[in-house]
Image (cartoon, helix red, strand yellow):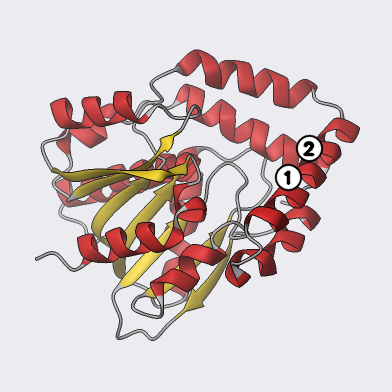
Amino acid sequence: MPEELQLRIHGDASLPTLIYLPGLHGDWTLVGGFLQALDGRVRFVEITYPRTLAWSLDDYAAAIETALAQKGITSGWLLGESFGSQPLWAMVGRASSRADACAKPPFQIEGVILAGGFVKHPMRWTIWLAERLTGRMSNMLFVWIIFSYAKIAKFRYRNSPGVLARVDEFVARRTDLDRRAAQHRLHLIAGFDPRPIARQTKLPVFGLSGILDPIVPWPLVRRWLKRNCPTLRDYKVIKSADHNVLGTAPKRAARQVLEWMNRR
């Protein structure tokens, strides 16, 4: 293993707990603005995945459960961003299996929120294509894309200190191994179908998307959830956001997530 799964915890244990499962990039470097917008009203747990080329989604789920248990975190909400929705569903499935076996889970899930997330990706061919393009991309092109993104991000988020503080870390983490780890995660998405889990879950489910999202078409995701997930409580679309809804509309996203977590 090139590294271990990492946790970073913000806030007191007395606060409601929100576990952030990052997207394809695999770390906490794009969620600074959202964390800042939460304004200390939850205990926010950030996760960075290892750059593994071998883990299954069940391995991701098991590692997250273990890391949380080691920190004494036994319950909370799951916030799955894009790819992060896939280990989220794996964790929900594991919890359901334990409940059926009358076994106590190591982590009690209180609710799940998809942020630019999905159940089974509604356009599987795009995942297949992205996996192959990522695998064939030269390291030089990969580096050029990352540095171009960093320049755009520093301009776009020039008034958001929470994001700017992490842009350099985002760039530093983008190595060739990181690219191959992202390719592996795309492969996991293509082979995973958590629809039976979503149909059977008894947990409250919420969805949040940006209106400009060509990566995960939210109309298809929302329609499937409304028709097939009986515990879907709400699905909001933020007009000022794109696929990275937590990063492009952090204040509105934080306000919505806090409202859902405070529902009784």
**SS for callout 2:** helix
Three-letter amino acid code at the position of disc 2 = Ile
Q: Position of residue 5 (x, y in %)?
A: 59, 59
Establish if 40 lies above or below 187: below
**What residue did someone put label 2 on?**
145
Q: Position of residue 95 (x, y in %)?
A: 26, 51
Question: Would you say 264 lies left or right of 149 here?
Answer: left
Question: Would you say 78 lies left or right of 161 here?
Answer: left
Q: Are marks 2 and 1 in contact (CB under 8 Å)?
A: yes
Pick the residue in front: 211 or 218.
211
Residue shown at the point (18%, 48%) measured from the top left: 101
Pick the residue in front: 150 or 136.
150
Residue shown at the point (56%, 66%) measured from the top left: 32
Establish if 174 lies above or below 66: above
Other-residue count near label 2 (Cα within 10 Å), few / some / many at <14 / 14–19 / ≥20: few
Question: Would you say 49 lies left or right of 44 here?
Answer: right
Q: Position of residue 235 (x, y in %)?
A: 23, 42
Pick the residue in front: 191 or 153.
153
**SS for callout 1:** helix
**What residue did someone put label 1 on?**
149
State whether residue 67 appears in this view.
no
Which mark, residue 23?
none
Q: Residue furthest top?
A: 125
For the C terminus, the quadrant is bottom left
Q: Position of residue 212 (x, y in %)?
A: 45, 34
Three-letter amino acid code at the position of disc 1 = Tyr
Other-residue count near label 1 (Cα within 10 Å), few / some / many at <14 / 14–19 / ≥20: some
